[in-house]
Image (spheres, helix red, strand yellow):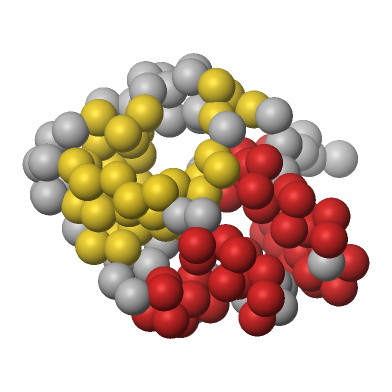
Amino acid sequence: MALEDDILFLRRIATFRVLGPDALRVLAISLETVHLRASELLFEEGEPADSAYAVVAGAIRLRRASAKPLEEPIVVGEGGLIGESALIVDTDRPASAISVEPSTLYKIPRGIFMRLLESDVEAAAGLRTMIARRIDAVLDDLDTVRPRFEPNA
């Protein structure tokens, strides 16, 4: 893709919408393209996570080793972001990622993303707000299921 196309692609991903035009341009320039054949391993559960991956084309299946036999794996398609938390925290991969079909991804290293946030206070504040809203939504969801797990009084 051309640079302007890469910027438009990144802008469609919620995590990167907080970045201003200059930061998006820097991010687009620093993208590393990864091509996978069908059934090729992108990363394995437990590996150190130092980057996220944006799915440009194709699909990636995420599966935990501890998944129950009937548990459906998560499939991330075009425009999806894999490993978002690795952009801001030092962590390990919580699941393995394997291509479902031939796929193209953009690798986004944590170091580059963090430098962009450090240089763009508004983007950092926007990301903090976005994460806070997600946490609030999860807590609200937990409140709806909590009665199922609490003993009757």
Quadrant of residue 65 in the image? top left
Q: Is residue 129 visible?
A: no
Question: How many numbered marks appear?
Answer: 0
Residue 104, x across and y down, in percent: 25, 54
Q: Residue at x 66, y 52 (%)?
A: 113
- Does 54 sit left or right of 149 as displayed? left
- Does 106 sit left or right of 26 as displayed? left
Determine whether 21 is above or below 153 in the image.
below
Q: Is residue 63 visible?
A: yes
Q: Residue at x 34, y 58 (%)?
A: 55
Residue 117, x across and y down, in percent: 78, 58
Tell which of 74 and 108 is nearer to you. 108
Residue 112, x across and y down, in percent: 65, 48
Quadrant of residue 14 in the image? bottom right
Tell which of 121 and 48 is nearer to you. 121
Determine whether 64 is above or below 110 in the image.
above
Q: Residue at x 30, y 45 (%)?
A: 34
Residue 134, x across and y down, in percent: 71, 62
Tell which of 40 and 20 is nearer to you. 20
Determine whether 125 is above or below 142 in the image.
below
- Does 125 sit left or right of 145 as displayed? right
